[in-house]
Image (cartoon, rainbow, N blue to C red):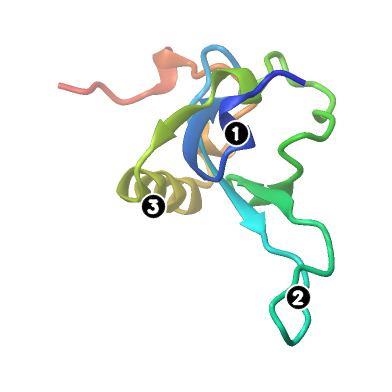
Amino acid sequence: MPDRPTSNPGFYKSRLHPKGPWVPIEVWLDDGERDETGELMSDQILRGLLGEISFDPFGPLAEGRTMDFRDTARPIDKAEYDRLIDRLRKDTTGPESRPHEAIDLTTQPPIF
C-alpha cells in the first residue's frame, strides 16, 4: 500500500467532493494494551475522525464518494482543525452540512 498522508498521525483537511467544503480529519495512533511492565500486548492501530465521524484510515470508503479524500488530504495545524470543527458544528444548513456535494456559489452570501 502506498504511503498516504493520512497514514501518519496528525491533523488534515480534505474535500469529499472536488468542489465541496473542507472537512477536518484527525488521525491518531491507538497505543494498544500494555502489561504492568509497559510491554505492548496488542497491536497499535491508526484511528481517525472525518469531521465527527470515526473512520479507519486504511479502510474502504463509503459509497457515493466522488474522490478519495486520503489522496487529497493536506496537513493543517490544530488551530485550523479546531476552526473547521467549530464551523462544522455551527453550520447545520450550509455547505459544511453536505460535504459530499459541490458548493452552490449562487446560494452563498457575497464575500465582499
Quarter of image, res 64: top right
How far apart marks 2 and 3 lie (CA) works out to 31 Å
Quarter of image, res 34: bottom right
Are dots 1 and 3 in contact, CB under 8 Å? no
Disc 2 residue type? Answer: Arg
Residue mark closest to the camera, 2 vs 1: 2
Residue mark closest to the camera, 2 vs 3: 2
Q: Secondary structure at mark 1?
A: helix
Q: Is residue 109 left or right of residue 65?
A: left
Say which of 94 and 70 sits in front.
70
The numbered disc on residue 34 is 2
For the C terminus, give its image quadrant. top left
Residue 46 sits above or below residue 63 on the image: below
Disc 3 residue type? Answer: Asp
Which residue is under mark 1? 6
How far apart marks 1 and 3 lie (CA) works out to 18 Å
Residue occupying the point 57% across, 39% down: 8
Q: Residue furthest left?
A: 112
The numbered disc on residue 82 is 3
| Residue 50 x %, y % | 62, 42
Say which of 13 and 37 sits in front.
37
Q: Secondary structure at mark 2?
A: loop
| Residue 103 x %, y % | 50, 19
Residue occupying the point 41% across, 13% down: 106
How far apart marks 2 and 1 lie (CA) works out to 25 Å
Are dots 2 and 1 in contact, CB under 8 Å? no
| Residue 46 x %, y % | 70, 48
Q: Residue furthest bottom?
A: 36
Residue occupying the point 80% across, 28% down: 61
Disc 1 residue type? Answer: Thr
For the N terminus, give its image quadrant. top right
Q: Is residue 16 visible?
A: no
